[in-house]
Amino acid sequence: MEEKFYMKKILAALITLFIVMPVFITGAAYAKTKKQPEKIDKTEYLNLSWWEKYNDPILTGYIQELYEKNHDLKIAALKVKEGEKLVRISFANELPQISFDGSFGRVMPSSNQQLGKLIVPSFSQYQFQMPLTASYEIDIWGENRLRTKSIAQQLEIIKQEERASYIALTSAFASVYFNLIKTDKLLDIQKDIVASQEEITKKTQKKFENGLCSVNEVINEEKFLTSQKEALNNLEHTKTVLENQLRVYLSDNNKELSRTDAEDIFVLKELPVRIDSSVVEMRPDYAESEANIKRIGYDVRVAKKEFLPKFIIYGQIGFNAYQWSKMFNSYSQLANAGIMPSFDLFSGGRKIAVLKLKKYQYEEAMHDYQKTILSGIQEVNDSCAQVKTDLKNYEQSVNRLSLENRKYLLMQHKNKIGAASDLDVLYNKEQALMTKREEVSNKINYLIATIGLYKAVGGQDLYKLEPAQKEVKSEDI
């Protein structure tokens, strides 16, 4: 009777171990875990409100299509999901592990078994076991929790990499799109230049035949014509390459591409030419560096706790019988429980080496963090300077084009009154076309520079950024 009483007490304790303890441990672990972040709408990464400022519905439409079809963005999203599962796996390792390890077999020992002076003869019998086995490492030092926190920081790094992918891909796509618009316009201008130069070459040839110029002038005009035809060929090649790039971004090799005419492109004005250095905190690489420092910091603490002993609770509850009919009888009940301490007395210096390794990695992460800040400020300052310079160049080319057009109109008037030849008109027309070519290039280059600045500040709306009180230089940090 007394044995049965103690057996019941053991069974009750094991039931508590197997049923109640996982519930409390799960709740405690979730209590330690930070509140789960809200799911981010990935369309926010596109920052469509910024792209709409270019006043080009075709561009914004393509960027939305990019979100739906681009393979790189889908790969980045899958990496985030993989990281989330790694965090879940690490969290699961903090919880008790319960398994069913049943067995069924035939035992056939020989007669050489001896218990003291008692010799057990040969026998055979069945053995049935149906135990539940549980084990749980008591996280006294918080080592397993730190491991989960480390993996959670790795997930944060992956999320920032995904955001960086959105910023980089949308910026690259928009740059290619504007370059294609520029190439289209330059092709039209170049065709006009070639046609004008062909006319100039013909008239120069007639002048030579009439003895009004030397053969060198004819050769020079023909040479210039061939160079302009080469430029036309290069532009056609560039157009094909840019179209292929856009189709790859949109994951459709047969897509018919639309774009706005260069003359209708809206030019952003009044952008900040100096931006406060704190803007680097918005960049994905800055957030990645911060998360990496935290991750390795957790790893260092884990490496330190590896020197401490571990304690594992283990136990079994179930049935063990030699006849199936008696499997669920009270005397067939199986139960055991205990705590197993574990401590490495000698590991060949492995733990010390791991600890030093993590400390070196932490120091390396700190240097990388400082480098990221300096590089980010430099990139922002360089992009601001590029935007400022390209805007000035565009404005100068607009003024120069206006002067060339006036000059061309005056030459046409002089031609009408007989004060200038047809060749003079063609030369001025050609010069105006070349100036127009420069104006188009400067206009698109400025727009691409604004995209570069958008990327440099971490995909933020440039009109919402705080301007710097003074010009920020890398050496000011």
Image (cartoon, rainbow, N blue to C red):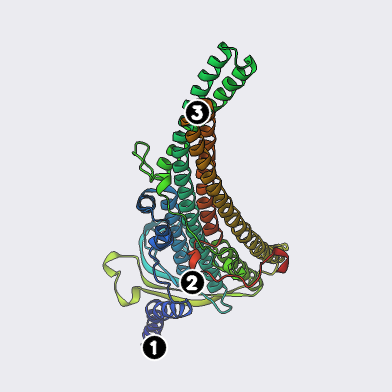
Amino acid carrying mark 1 in the image: Glu
In the rendered image, residue 77, in percent from the top left (x then y), is placed at 42, 56
Task: Tell me the residue that label 2 is attached to.
Answer: 94
Q: Residue at x 46, y 56 (%)?
A: 166
> What is the crowding at mark 3: few (fewer than 14 residues within 10 Å), some, or many (at least 20)?
few
Amino acid carrying mark 2 in the image: Glu
Q: In whole angstroms, how far apart are the C-alphas of marks 3 and 2?
A: 96 Å
Q: In terms of sequence position, does the residue under pointer 1 or pointer 2 come before the other?
A: 1
Which of the 4 quarters of the picture holds residue 47? bottom left
Q: In terms of sequence position, does the residue under pointer 3 or pointer 2 come before the other?
A: 2
Task: Tell me the residue that label 3 is attached to.
Answer: 418
Q: Is residue 237 above or below residue 21?
A: above
> What is the crowding at mark 1: few (fewer than 14 residues within 10 Å), some, or many (at least 20)?
few
In the rendered image, residue 78, in percent from the top left (x then y), is placed at 42, 55
Residues 96 and 189: in front is: 189
The residue most toward the front is 417
Task: Tell me the residue that label 1 is attached to.
Answer: 2
